[in-house]
Amino acid sequence: MSFLFGLPLLAMVLAGSLEIETVSVEYRGDNGSVPPPYRRSTDIRIDADGSGTLTRLHGYDHSDSSQRFETAFVVSPEQRHQFNQRLQQRGLWDTRWHERENVPVGGPRVSLSFSRGAQKVTLPAFPITRQQEAVDALRAEVLALVPETATAAWQAWEQGKPDSE
């Protein structure tokens, strides 16, 4: 009899763990509005299934393949599980994130959003002071998911480019 009562409980636990495993991430960073030779942007996308891409762009023209580096990677189920636990521990889903009142005009900017089912959380590019440390930590969590092989390939590509900065 207890086995029958245990099945619904097990189903709820599994559903909860599956829900937390389905997080997708969009990270976009750039160095601001500058002339094309100096513009640098980095996009990281990680889908809920763990497939990810790292894209680095010099300039503004996304169609110019000579100025764009892109590599695919996979985040393992174990890494995703640990990542999702850290997101929960850092209060991502439960915090009301706030942008500070006076944000800089121009200059570097990082936008970061997380989606889990119908829930989407976008972190402020310029958070209020008391949330800055948490936002920085969440950005670092995303960057840490990019494998060293992808980062090394990106850096090798950067070294092969003329230095316009």
Image: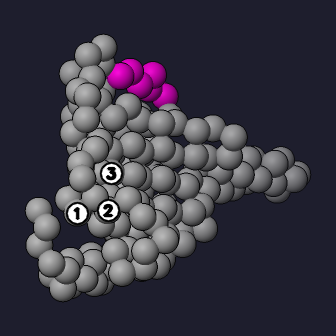
- For label 3, the SS is strand
* Residue 123, percent from left and from top: 41, 35
Asked if 85 appears above or below 68 in the picture, the reply is above
Does the magenta stretch mainly form a helix, a strand or a loop? Answer: loop
Neighbourhood count class around disc 1 (C-alpha, 10 Å): few under 14, some 14–19, many 20 upward: some
Residue 4 is one of the magenta-drawn residues = no
What's drawn in magenta, residue-wise?
A: 94-99
Looking at the rendered structure, the kind of residue marked 2 is Gly
Q: CA distance from mark 2 to mark 1?
A: 6 Å
Q: Which residue is mark 1?
A: 37
Q: Which residue is mark 3?
A: 29
Please name the residue shown 13% across and 67% down the image: 164
Residue 69 position by quadrant:
bottom left
Asked if 85 appears above or below 119 in the picture, the reply is below
Looking at the rendered structure, the kind of residue marked 3 is Gly
Pick whichever, 53 or 59, lies toward us: 59
Residue 99 visible within the image: yes
Residue 11: which numbered mark, if any?
Answer: none
Q: Which residue is mark 2?
A: 59
Question: Which comes sooner in the sequence, label 3 or label 2?
Answer: 3
Residue 105 position by quadrant:
top left
Q: CA distance from mark 3 to mark 2?
A: 13 Å
Q: CA distance from mark 1 to mark 3?
A: 17 Å
Q: Is residue 160 left or right of residue 60?
A: left
Looking at the rendered structure, the kind of residue marked 1 is Pro
